[in-house]
Image (cartoon, rainbow, N blue to C red):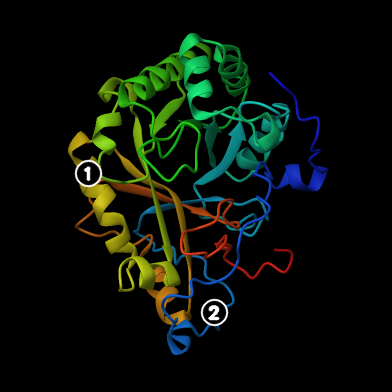
Amino acid sequence: MKKLMKKNLSTAAIALLLLCAADMPGRSEMQYAGIAPNPAASVKTIIDKRPVLHADGIRFGAYDPHGDFGAQSNVSTEALFLPWEDVDLETLRVADAYAQARGRNLLITVEPWSWDVDWRLTSNELRQKVLRGDYDVNMRAIAQMISQLKSPVIVRWGQEMEDKSGRFSWSGWNPRDYIAAYKRMMDIVRQEAPGTQIMWSPKGEPGLQDYYPGDDYVDLVGLSVFGLERYDELAYDKLRTFSEALKQGYDLVAGYGKPIWVAELGYQGGDAYVRPWIETATLKQSAFPNLQEVVYFNDRDVHAWPFDLGRPDWRVVDSISN
């Protein structure tokens, strides 16, 4: 396994679980010029848009590299992202201590690539090497480290596999190949870290059912739900609520009878757009009886969105550094 040689994580960053991807350069931040935005609808005065946590509501977790939820007591899960190359796995011990001190689970998303674009394989190269077993040693090292952690751990591998945007090298594979790869990796996790829960995590798009690996390989289902006001205007000609954004993916996976999480949640826009998301993201709704937890992605998006919308900043408080 390659170690983190080109990028060094600071002690403070590690303490706050700064296991996040580097910014991708060269992305356009310009708004799509085809349709004019509505300035009145985009007024922003809310300075902290963290979800309201209802006493009898859905559990809440966060990917929180900036530590905005560090002192919040009612957070169930600490999420982090981990490439299986170019990372020092000893940082997981710090993440474990951070989560354990706060009584939180760990949701570890293992991304099967390098965050260094210079080391990244093509999609086909990655697929061939994973299926051939070349990366078994990488996954085994991660699983062996997980077995030493004290916090309850959930492993999420190769998320959003049905996405066809080209965002991830493992997305859009032939379903049979993806399922074989997923099972191979989760077998390693079960061998090396018994008791670890495993999460199958599609984006929530039509066709996801082709990638379902079977009930024996899914403890939890995770979906991705993001709300970007300008994107909604351009893609849907309407502004979507959290419930509307969740419904498609939820309906596609509800029949599996598994506990469902929103493994990645984020929203950005004017007050009138984000306030309903703030108020309903953790509200129990009869339409989503299997929804157990939502996990907020508290950082700027790593990837540029369509329509030249750049990389949205999902962070719950304004980020001067971004």
Mark toward the start of the polypeptide (2 vs 1): 2
Percent position of residue 130, x then y = 50, 17
Q: Which amino acid lies under the numbered mark 2 shown in the image of this protein?
A: Ile
Secondary structure at badge 1 equals: helix
Task: State whether residue 134 is above or below residue 246.
Answer: above
- Left or right, 36 with respect to 70, comes to left
Percent position of residue 105, x then y = 52, 38
Q: CA distance from mark 2 to mark 1?
A: 33 Å
Residue drawn at point x = 59 percent, y = 27 percent: 121
Tell me where residue 198 sits by quadrant.
top left
Task: State whether residue 12 is above or below residue 136.
Answer: below
Secondary structure at badge 2 equals: loop
Residue at image mark 2: 46
Percent position of residue 279, x then y = 39, 70
Disc number placed over residue 252 in the picture, else none:
1
Residue count near mark 2 (Cα–Cα under 10 Å), binned few <14, some 14–19, many ≥20: some
Q: In the picture, which quadrant includes the C terminus?
A: bottom right
Percent position of residue 263, x then y = 43, 45
Task: State whether residue 133 is above or below residue 103.
Answer: above
